[in-house]
Amino acid sequence: MACNGAREPLLTRLADCTPANNNSNGCGPNRRRIRRVRSAPLADFVPKDINGDAPPLPRSPSIFGNLHPSFRKVAIFLTVYLGVGTICFYIVRNQISGKKTNGILDAVYFCVVTMTTVGYGDLVPNSVLTKLLACTFVFSGMALVGLFLGKAADYLVEKQEIMLVKALHKHKRVGKTEIIKEAETHGIRYKLYTVSFVLVVLISSGTIFLATVEKLDPVDAFYCVCSTITTLGYGDQSFSTEAGRIFAVFWILTGTICVAQFFLYMTELNTENRRRALVKWVLTRKMTNVDLEAADLNEDGVVDAAEFIIYKLKEMGKISQEDISLVMDEFEDLDVDQSGTLSTSDIILGQSTET
């Protein structure tokens, strides 16, 4: 099947690996090679171009170097939003009714309450201009939270996740690679643990602050905290003092984003658990003749290792037929000599064709 000179599927000959011919046809090394396939070739084996110079290999970004978004961009957008909003709502402060403390502080507080869609109702626009401004800032604020602040919060949680992995293995000598592997394997679970802890701290601190500074009953304080961080904002309980609104500017923004991340990680964890259950089912169920026929890509009556791997990956939902078609199109483009295999000569011929 593999040695007839005809065009063969990717990674052929693995199905012919029997104890009798392992040493004669090279199946043993091939079988080991498919188990330790790399995502990129080593630099020593990169073919040189026409001029004899080896092209530089693109380095894979480290998870430690590229986890975070541009915090400078986040800070700029947040500063611009709060700055412009504060100026606008301060200018029209006389057209906003409700419980007021300090003009500038109330403007910042109103911006944050609007951006996070809490909307207590303790400060409300009562003119056409202020209502139009509120409509503008609520949409731009939601976009800011969704596009930038959410990414920043996710980065901070990922940093804490790595610290959590290190703490769990503090008595072991664990390198950066092991930490990355552990974070990738149980990343969502660690993120959920981290954001849950932060959420408990925020709820506790908010409840204590409202009870001590705003003089609310403990039950009312907890009720106000829950209605705030879930953006219900009934309005019967809110921050009404200067100290309370200074605290609220930071606490509301942090709390609402933290709750959003908490439910996001819960959803991702549920999806990951379902995916792992599917993978386990695919790997443990017995193969049937129907499966064998479906896995036989070249319809030659037998299934080699590559066909079996592709079939199982498709069942797990990790790849689709469209993905396979795109990869095979790329393979056929690279296979300049139409031999059904890729070699150094194919790469050199491809480079000479491009130039």
Image (tube, helix red, strand yellow):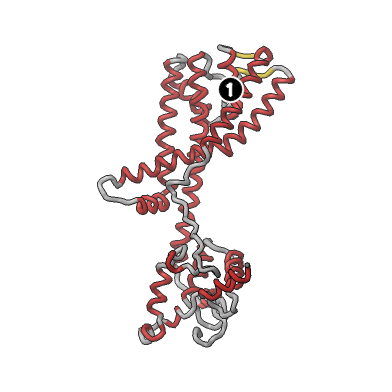
Decide which of 204, 74 is in the foreground and name it. Answer: 74
Q: In this view, does 334 lie above or below 97?
A: below
Decide which of 244, 157 is in the foreground and name it. Answer: 157
Tell me where residue 101 sits by quadrant.
top right
Please state the horizontal and vertical placement of residue 111, each as a whole percent of the image.
Answer: 60, 24
Residue 8 visible in the current orientation = yes
Residue found at x 63% / y 67%: 355
Residue at image mark 1: 120
Residue 307 visible in the current orientation = no
Please state the horizontal and vertical placement of residue 237, each as a whole percent of the image.
Answer: 53, 19
Residue found at x 50% / y 65%: 53
Instruction: Classify residue 172 as left or right of residue 199.
Output: left
Question: Which amino acid lies under the numbered mark 1 shown in the image of this protein?
Answer: Tyr
Please state the horizontal and vertical placement of residue 262, each as a whole percent of the image.
Answer: 48, 39
Q: In this view, does 16 lie above or below 251?
A: below
Residue found at x 51% / y 85%: 1
Secondary structure under tag 1 reads loop
**How many C-alpha atoms fall within 10 Å of the one at disc 1: few (<14), some, or many (≥20)?**
many
Q: Is residue 331 above or below residue 177?
A: below
* Furthest residue toward left: 171
Please state the horizontal and vertical placement of residue 308, each as a whole percent of the image.
Answer: 49, 73
